[in-house]
Image (cartoon, grey):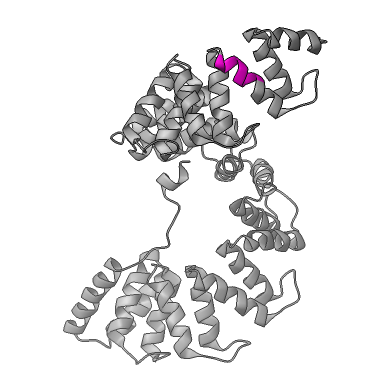
Amino acid sequence: MSVDIATLTDEANAGSVEAQLQLADLYEHGFGVATDICQAAYWYRQAADQGSVKAQSYLGQMYLRGIGVPEDIDQGVLWLKKAADQEDPSAIANLAWCYQKGSGTKQDLERSFELYLKAARAGHAGARYNLAYMYANGIGTPRDEKAALMWYDRAAEQGHMKAQLNAGIMYAYGIGTDKDLGIAAKRYAEAANQGHPKAQYNLALLYASGDGVEQDDEAAFKWHLKSANQAYARAQFNIGLFYLYGIGVGQDLEQARCWFEKAADQGYVKAHYQLARMYYDGRGVAQDIGKALELYQKAAGHGYAKAQYRLGKILAGGTNVEPDEKLAFEWVNKAAMQGYTKAQHLLSMMYARGIGAEKDYVRSYAWLSLAASCNDPGIFRTLKQIAAKLSASQIDAARQLARQLHESFKPVAREGITNNIL
């Protein structure tokens, strides 16, 4: 549709608010004219000065973000308040954000909550998302997970991508509702189809496990790949595993290495660990013990229990490296203190044989009793052998020590639910 810009401009200059708004929209989106955000801001200002609530709302947002005008938070808040006073939902929602962040006004979380609630009730999707976030985290209002989910769901139904993701997370973990992986998968898919990398990753995990959807390795690979191509480190790592083991795709060790490297470049410690294993074993790459040890140390230094255990095991055994029993003991102990049963088993044997520490059957028994939680029959046999070397009082002391050790464990931090929710 052709637009007579000259006539429209004449009408706008003559004071027609409708023409001013139409011109602003045309310049903002480049319809019939070259895109010119500054011209858009100019015409929004003309309409705003005449009391147009739409123009006031848009102009306030432009000042907040420095779009088409120099960034001026105070001016942004001024215009948003004018539009909010006329009940404009978008202005109310943006003003709530200013109160939430203390931007252009004194921070007031309770006021922010009130404004988000008002805009949310008026149907503003972004306000519904932010209101849900405040309910979920107890910001400006008592924490209320059921209310959070309700508002996330309402925003999700309007196509709000982050709300779809967060609603999916809440259904997946049973937060504010009964756990329902089928609905979680539905919400993840909605956000995933809009391109959200975390939603794509979460959906991929459900396809991999068959939770909430029919198990499908190829679908799991597809969604992991979509997420990985957006540089989501966890997905990059998992794509590496898919190629490494030929799951949902043909085995390709070179591709596995490439994807592990992408994740490692982002500091993902599990990727450092997998690369270390490949270089140590010469699997898909030329064997390079030095590089393997460097990667193991990098992952171990970031607290990854499997890397700490394997590094300790290598140093203790002296396989392809100069043995260092003391350092080996330190790494294995770190992994054991995170509750890693293989490390607990190895640490028990190190105490029993005096490797890296004084021989101590009491501590050996204590650690092995903790490792027995994996129900390995071999561990139970070894436990009986060590018990034969101890008196009844020493066994009691070992059991007491095991309880103390268990209480002091520092399990590997996993991503909490609160951190999952954006």
Quarter of the image where one finds residue 8: top right
Which of these two is toward me, 201 or 31?
31
State the residue at coordinates (38%, 24%).
117
| Magenta span: chief secondary structure | helix
Which of these two is toward me, 291 or 122?
122
State the residue at coordinates (73%, 50%).
249
Residue 26 appears left or right of 156: right
Residue 170 appears left or right of 109: right
Residue 91, percent from left and from top: 49, 23
State the residue at coordinates (58%, 33%).
191
Q: Is residue 47 magenta?
A: yes
Q: Is residue 241 magenta?
A: no
In this view, 125 is above or below 275: above
Task: Specify the farthest residue to the left.
Answer: 393
In this view, 101 is above or below 356: above
Residue 383 appears left or right of 414: left
Which of these two is toward me, 296 or 110?
110
Task: Specify the farthest residue to the front.
Answer: 14
In this view, 185 is above or below 121: below
In this view, 61 is above or below 210: above
Can residue 386 be seen at all in this image of the molecule?
yes
Residue 199, percent from left and from top: 57, 39
Which of these two is toward me, 254 or 63?
63
Can residue 154 be seen at all in this image of the molecule?
no
Residue 372, percent from left and from top: 36, 69
Picture quarter with the N terminus: top right
Residue 146, percent from left and from top: 35, 30
State the residue at coordinates (78%, 7%).
7
Residue 257 appears left or right of 201: right
Task: Look at the image and give the residue range highlighted in magenta.
Answer: 43-49
